[in-house]
């Protein structure tokens, strides 16, 4: 397989060699397939019967026409690539998928369209997980949970069609150095807990609760997003773990079967971040060291008080983040009730963190 040079590194030069390299790099083709298609294109050109590399690949059924069209430029796919949808600009990107703004071609309803990378779609387990996201989010009908309208496959492209939320994720303020007042953070936690209560009631564990998976729209409403790692309650055990390591509950990190209390632990870490703008553990520590740090945090008595939060907030965060899940709140109902009481009570003091 010829290697790309700097002169080949152009997204619109039409070079078969460059495009073949992209398909191999992205996992859509095996190297031997790309080399075979390039050789065939060269042979046919020499015989006066030119056929492009892409045409050979589709004729061999190694990739579909839609996958080829997507791979020409995944950042700006053809507007009419998916039936019934007008694709717009890319609004998000991850290791498995790209998210685009879109519009329903008939109703003109704004959409968010999440497309699984074609190379990732070569792994059946990844495809199953992708469509499980639609199943999980679709089961959790709640105002604070992103609405997934449907999932579909078109000519080899797997995609989810969701509501488009005009807002920002709740990691952005933290990245900008901002924290929330104690009352603001508790209100966010209340909305998040209500959303996660709906997830649990539908029989699921989200498994990736963290600030960036909560959006707030222009009206201030919170939305829980990204169900890509969600699993049914009582599953999730094994030799590997899934989730963001800094927010994993101890039982999730150790590969045990999990229940909604794993999400409760992660929401406790998230609430700590909203309050103080940092993680309660060293984010650069190895996973085993993180587990030790979680244990130490759960045993200390003065950390949160020293950071000047109300004693009720101190108790709340500590209980949510208890190392032993049996010591956390017994249910989302119990946590929601506690947060409702705390956020409805009149403020009796100025947030000390604001007057330093």
Image (cartoon, rainbow, N blue to C red):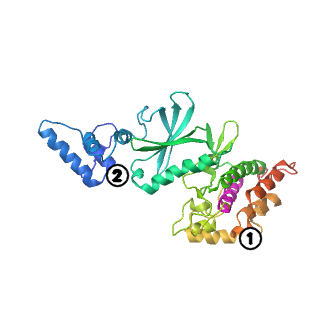
Residue closer to the observer: 165 or 82:
82
Left or right: 350 with respect to 190? Answer: right
Q: Was residue 198 drawn as part of the magenta stretch in this picture?
A: no
On the image, the x and y values in percent for residue 38 come to 22, 46
Q: Where is mark 2, residue-wise?
A: 25
Residue at 72% across / 69% down in the picture?
326
On the image, the x and y values in percent for residue 194 come to 72, 50
Left or right: 222 with respect to 243? Answer: right
* Residue 224 appears anywhere in the view: yes
- Asked whether disc 2 touches disc 1, contact meaning CB atoms under 8 Å apart, the reply is no
Q: Give the magenta part as a residue range.
A: 261-276
On the image, the x and y values in percent for residue 167 come to 62, 39
In the rendered image, the vertical position of residue 274 relative to residue 290, given as above or below? above
Label number found at residue 350: none
In the rendered image, the vertical position of residue 113 relative to residue 334, given as above or below? above
Residue closer to the observer: 205 or 87:
205
Label number found at residue 300: 1
Local crowd size for mark 1, using a 10 Å CA cut-off: few (<14), some (14–19), many (≥20): few
- Which type of secondary structure does the marked residue at label 1 adopt? loop
């Amino acid at each position: 397989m010829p290697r790309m040079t700097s002169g080949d590194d152009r997204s619109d030069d039409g070079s078969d060699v460059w495009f073949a390299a992209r398909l191999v790099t992205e996992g859509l083709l095996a190297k031997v397939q790309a080399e075979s298609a390039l050789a065939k294109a060269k042979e046919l050109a020499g015989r006066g019967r030119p056929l492009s590399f892409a045409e050979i690949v589709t004729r061999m059924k190694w990739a579909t026409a839609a996958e080829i069209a997507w791979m020409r430029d995944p950042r700006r796919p053809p507007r009419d690539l998916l039936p019934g949808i007008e694709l717009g600009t890319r609004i998000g990107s991850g290791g498995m998928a790209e998210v685009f703004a879109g519009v329903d071609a008939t109703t003109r309803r704004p959409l968010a369209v999440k497309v699984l990378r074609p190379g990732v779609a070569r792994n059946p387990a990844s495809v199953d997980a992708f469509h499980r996201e639609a199943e999980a989010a679709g089961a959790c009908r709640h105002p604070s949970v992103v609405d997934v309208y449907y999932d579909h496959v078109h000519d080899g492209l797997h995609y989810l069609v969701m509501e488009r939320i005009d807002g920002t994720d709740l990691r952005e303020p933290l990245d900008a150095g901002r924290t929330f007042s104690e009352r603001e953070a508790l209100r966010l936690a209340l909305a998040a807990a209500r959303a996660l209560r709906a997830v649990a009631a539908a029989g699921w564990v989200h498994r990736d609760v963290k600030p960036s998976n909560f959006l707030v729209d222009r009206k201030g409403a919170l939305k829980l997003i990204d169900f890509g790692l969600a699993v049914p309650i009582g599953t999730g055990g094994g030799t590997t773990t899934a989730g963001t390591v800094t927010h994993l509950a101890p039982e999730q990190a150790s590969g045990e079967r999990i229940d909604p209390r794993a999400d409760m632990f992660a929401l406790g870490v998230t609430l700590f971040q909203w309050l103080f703008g940092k993680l309660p553990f060293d984010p650069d520590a190895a996973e085993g060291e993180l587990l030790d740090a979680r244990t130490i945090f759960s045993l200390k008595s003065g950390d949160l008080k020293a950071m000047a939060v109300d004693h009720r907030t101190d108790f709340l965060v500590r209980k949510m983040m208890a190392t032993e899940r049996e010591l956390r709140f017994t249910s989302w109902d119990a946590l929601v009730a506690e947060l409702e009481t705390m956020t409805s009570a009149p403020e009796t003091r100025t947030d000390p963190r604001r007057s330093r």
